[in-house]
Image (spheres, rainbow, N blue to C red):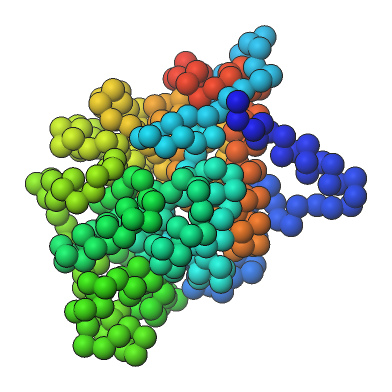
């Protein structure tokens, strides 16, 4: 039996008897608002902003409002077990921390703080290739915690193999390959602030520490950062591969492989046909294609088409425990949380990530129980109704 995440509310109420309140809100829908007050505009909008007009970001949130939970009564739901196993990774709830790069722009401890917080809760962290910290240092901070690795696929095969080997050696069990960001979308908030962390040498710790990457430079990244940045950007963007490239990953990664960025049923089927182990139904949190389909709208047909052939995960727009509930009920095996934990990091480092994540987990736990369910496995579309 896993820990009762819902007990976090009792902990917070008891602290109130001593005059203590949470350092920042327990409402993840308000975290961006308070984070904006403590961050410079460039870093804030890099995290919060989306592609174009922001229509896809709005659609992600609106899609959750189209589904309503239908609570059931007298279901013996006082005791719950939220634990699950996804691609061989046991987890205390069907929740992972999404791969978010350049975390040092919101807090100096960056990915190290996130790794420690995730490990303490047993929640898997997915480390981004665009990390501010090396693979090895994040693994050390994670300790025995579960961890997956996200790949932005460089167009140098030797560098790609080197990065994959480092991740495997450091104990990252599952590879998550992001497909939808082979070049950056038009992001007005970042453009208006002329702000891109990578050209400043932030979010480049993994390539800059890689022996293959370093061997191709005339001078070290420490001595000539601009040239190293230019070389990495050229390797990191501009290559939109095809389905025939996937065997390369299988050849060089022994564990499960998950494709992130799937929005179309036919692409989901092709992923299954290609022998992939999982997919993430995702539109990159609305950061890549303006006016795209909401991820939650894409989820049910994809889960129905391939849910029996591979693991279907979900992200984009998740803010609350009710959101997690709805995504699981609509066919996701697990849900990736992005911006909320980053705002927690911005507020209070490791403690902030823990507070933001515990708040969402408690909300999910209580929502599951109060709706009459005892485990994620019991959540099906019958737990919801769609409204206009």
Left or right, 106 with respect to 301, comes to right
Instruction: Give percent across and percent down for residue 61.
Output: 48, 42
Instruction: Give percent across and percent down for residue 64.
Output: 48, 35
The answer to whether residue 318 of the structure is visible from this angle is no
Front residue (pair 119, 69): 119
Q: For the view shown, which residue lies furthest in the left direction?
A: 244
- Residue located at (48% from left, 60% from top): 140
Instruction: Give percent across and percent down for residue 26.
Output: 68, 47
Q: For the view shown, which residue lies furthest in the top direction?
A: 74
Left or right, 119 with respect to 303, comes to right
- Residue located at (50% from left, 54% from top): 142
Please determine whether, in this image, residue 253 is positioned above or below residue 225.
above
Please determine whether, in this image, residue 371 is positioned above or below residue 117.
above
Please determine whether, in this image, residue 102 is positioned above or below residue 119.
below
Front residue (pair 360, 133): 133
- Residue located at (63% from left, 44% from top): 358
Tell me how many marks there are: 0
Quadrant assignment for the N terminus: top right
Left or right, 198 with respect to 249, comes to right
């Amino acid at each position: 039996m896993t820990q009762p995440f819902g007990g976090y509310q009792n902990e917070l109420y008891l602290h109130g008897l001593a005059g203590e309140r949470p350092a920042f809100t327990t409402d993840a829908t308000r975290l961006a608002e308070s984070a904006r007050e403590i961050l410079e505009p460039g870093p804030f909008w890099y995290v919060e902003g989306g592609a174009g007009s922001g229509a896809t970001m709005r659609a992600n949130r609106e899609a959750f409002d189209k589904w309503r939970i239908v609570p059931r009564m007298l279901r013996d739901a006082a005791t719950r077990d939220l634990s699950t196993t996804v691609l061989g990774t046991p987890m205390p709830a069907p929740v992972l921390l999404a791969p978010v790069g350049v975390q040092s722009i919101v807090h100096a401890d960056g990915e190290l703080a996130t790794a420690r917080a995730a490990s303490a809760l047993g929640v898997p962290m997915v480390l981004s290739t665009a990390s501010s910290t090396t693979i090895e240092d994040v693994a050390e901070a994670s300790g025995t915690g579960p961890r997956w690795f996200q790949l932005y696929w460089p167009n140098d095969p030797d560098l790609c193999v080197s990065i994959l080997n480092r991740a495997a050696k450091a104990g990252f069990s599952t590879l998550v390959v992001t497909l939808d960001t082979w070049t950056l979308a038009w992001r007005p908030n970042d453009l208006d602030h002329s702000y891109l962390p990578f050209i400043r040498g932030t979010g480049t710790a993994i390539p800059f520490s890689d022996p293959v990457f370093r061997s191709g430079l005339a001078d070290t990244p420490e001595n000539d950062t601009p040239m190293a940045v230019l070389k990495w950007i050229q390797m990191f963007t501009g290559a939109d591969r095809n389905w025939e490239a996937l065997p390369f990953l299988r050849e060089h990664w022994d564990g499960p492989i998950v494709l992130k960025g799937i929005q179309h049923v036919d692409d989901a089927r092709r992923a299954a046909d290609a022998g992939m182990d999982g997919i993430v139904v995702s539109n990159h949190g609305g950061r890549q294609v303006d006016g795209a389909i909401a991820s939650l709208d894409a989820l049910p047909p994809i889960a129905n088409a391939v849910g029996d052939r591979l693991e279907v995960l979900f992200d984009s727009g998740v803010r609350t425990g009710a959101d997690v509930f709805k995504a699981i009920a609509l066919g996701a095996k697990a849900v990736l949380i992005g911006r909320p934990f980053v705002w927690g990091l911005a507020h209070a480092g490791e403690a902030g990530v823990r507070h933001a994540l515990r708040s969402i987990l408690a909300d999910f736990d209580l929502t599951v129980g109060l709706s009459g369910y005892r485990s994620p496995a019991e959540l099906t579309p019958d737990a919801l109704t769609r409204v206009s």
